Amino acid sequence: MISLQHSKQRNKSLVNKFNPKKLLNSKWTALSPQNKELHFIVVKLIESEVDEGKIERCLLQSVMHKADYEIACQDLKDGSVWQQGWK
């Protein structure tokens, strides 16, 4: 499993809103692709060990290379890095 590196600076005007319960199998576009990986699908949701039922992390799969990346679900809210759907 590989980690995605993205900027920690967040632009508060660019916020993706989503329902965590509908996150599984959702499609995402990286706005600054790495290794030609532009499109991703959420293939697994990982719940918090402390707060039962809270989705903490998610597993993204690259459509092009089928590589898996584990990220914090909150990272998908950053509209300067991720865009909902495939664009």
Image (cartoon, rainbow, N blue to C red):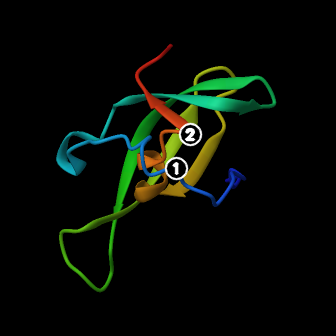
Q: Residues within 10 Å of mark 1 (few under 14, many from 20)?
A: few
Give above or below for 52 relative to 46. Answer: below
Q: Position of residue 53 (x, y in %)?
A: 18, 69
Q: In the rendered structure, which disc, 2 or 1, sits on the residue that comes first in sequence?
A: 1
- Locate residue 48: give its quadrant: bottom left
Instruction: Classify residue 85 as left or right of residue 21.
Output: right
Q: Secondary structure at mark 1?
A: loop
Q: Which residue is mark 1?
A: 11
Residue shown at 62% from the left, 58% from the top: 9
Q: Secondary structure at mark 2?
A: loop
Instruction: Classify residue 80 as left or right of residue 64.
Output: left
Which residue of the protein is positioned furthest toward the bottom in this rendering? 50
Q: CA distance from mark 2 to mark 1?
A: 7 Å
Which residue of the protein is positioned furthest toward the front in this rendering? 13
Q: Which residue is mark 2?
A: 80
Residue shown at 41% from the left, 55% from the top: 73
Tag 2 and tag 1, C-beta contact below 8 Å: yes
Observer-nearest residue: 70 or 77?
77
Residue shown at 39% from the left, 44% from the top: 15
Q: Amino acid under label 1?
A: Asn
Residue shown at 81% from the left, 30% from the top: 35
Which residue of the protein is positioned furthest toward the right in this rendering? 35
